[in-house]
Amino acid sequence: MDLNHLSFEFGQEIPATWSFGLDVLDGFEQFMDTTPNLDPAVSYGAQRAPEGSTANRASSDDITDTHAEHTSKGRLSAEKKQQNNRAAQKRFRQRQKERCHTIEAQLSETTKQLHELRVRQKQLEARNALLEKVAKLTKQPSGESPAESSSSPSFPFSLQADAERALSGVVTETERGPVITFTVEDHDLVMTVEEVGKISSAAFQRLYSTYARKLGACLLELSDSESSSAAAEDMHRWITELTSLTICVSLGNPKGLKAFHSASMDGSSATVNQLPDSFYEDLLNAVELSEAQIQDLLHLRRLFCGKIGQLGRARKALMSQLPSESIGASHASDKLDQVTSLAEQLRANGSEEYRTYMQYASTFYRGIITAKQHAIGIVHSYPFIPEKHRLLELLVAKRHEPTVEALTQSAGLDDLQHAANWQQIDEYLKTVTVQNMHQYIPLIKDNMSEDASLSIDPDQPLDSFL
């Protein structure tokens, strides 16, 4: 039958002559199992199942074994991969740690080098500043024999013991009396204490300039070789001589002391009062005070203010006892003894006040400040003599210490307590000698109590004593 020409409508019966096996399956025999079904009750698939069941089970077992093998291999591969990852991470962390250590070491070394460079830069800047000062000092006229003033010396009686103690080891007894030797240039200048006390302002300026030049050259030599014992000895000797000069002038000519210190040592018209705060900032940086020295200076300031305040209040009390101007002539003779007594007490008060200032200055320069720091301050400040109270006020501002105004009240301390506190300075100065004045001598001891409430009189300006 030709299937291409077979056509019938849906629902019509298939012709009886049409054979499924011959007409439809014609040509597909090669793909079919033509073994007859021996048991009609058993399906074809059921009859063939026994033959393929063993193979299927074997194939299934093979698949299961293969899957287990693959699973086991996969698990081993994952574990090995994790081990490799952990090992790689460990090596990475180790490299990172070593790199961090290397960077830290490089940073530490760089920081150290930077610090050393900054220190060296600071030293070079200080040396350049010192060279400029020395060059300026070299242009000044050389020291001449000091001329004497016509005024007679006036040593307050209460200062005699202090003067003898400060000049002990410096003064030599001769037929002319006690003398001091000043090494001016290449020759020695020998003057009695009275002659030094009567020295003129011009002569003082020439001597001061000479010592400033000497100290500048000495500091340059010390900066080149810190172990130069000869330069250190020269510096100590010149500081001692210059300090003795200042002490004698301060004691022998109290009225000229302020003029000497406020004038310019090069003879110009400029005064120390015209110096800005930046000048004292640079001076503090050049001197390089230690923390212990700063604490001692602040303690000295408190004691000094307390003592000056106690003297100021005593002076006010004496002034209030003076007779009024309206007193009659008939009563004047009755008040003469009282006025005379008050005058003597006021004179003693003034002498004690001046002595307090001298002890304050001696503690500042001869005890707390070292000889090298003193020399640096002289050379750095030339042609001026720096004011101590302005240096202290800079320290006060940086350390938030009480101001002079804040220290005006006694805060429960009576005048006897203030006087007793200042006695500490008197005892301290007894320990300062020519042999140890070149080094730092601590003012604050372990058993010394500090009292921040020490004060001065509000109506008494501090500048008049500094």
Image (cartoon, grey):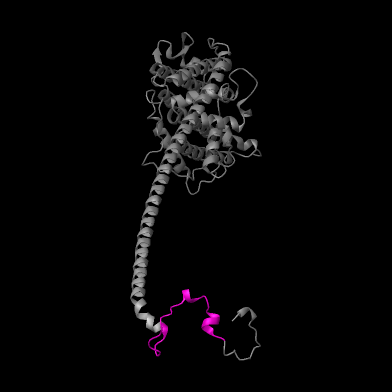
Q: In this orientation, does residue 157 appear?
A: no
Q: In this orientation, does residue 370 appear?
A: yes
Image quadrant in which you'd find residue 405: top right
Horizontally, residue 260 falls left or right of residue 452, namely: right
Say above or below: 69 vs 94. Answer: below
Residue 138 image offset from top left, x and y in percent: 55, 13
Quadrant that contains the N terminus:
bottom right
Residue 283 image offset from top left, x and y in percent: 54, 29
Say above or below: 400 vs 141. Answer: below
Q: Main secondary structure of the magenta part?
A: loop
Residue 298 image offset from top left, x and y in percent: 48, 38
Q: Residue at x 48, y 49 (%)?
A: 412
Q: Residue at x 61, y 35 (%)?
A: 332
218 magenta-colored: no
**Of the pair 364 and 104, the residue shown nearer to us:** 104
Residue span colored magenta: 18-44
**Of the pair 309 and 139, the residue shown nearer to us:** 139
**Of the pair 64 and 409, the residue shown nearer to us:** 64
Residue reaching furthest to the top: 187
Horizontally, residue 109 falls left or right of residue 314, namely: left
**Of the pair 291 and 262, the residue shown nearer to us:** 291
Image quadrant in which you'd find residue 263: top right
Quadrant that contains the C terminus:
top right
* Total residue callouts: 0
43 magenta-colored: yes
Residue 67 image offset from top left, x and y in percent: 37, 67
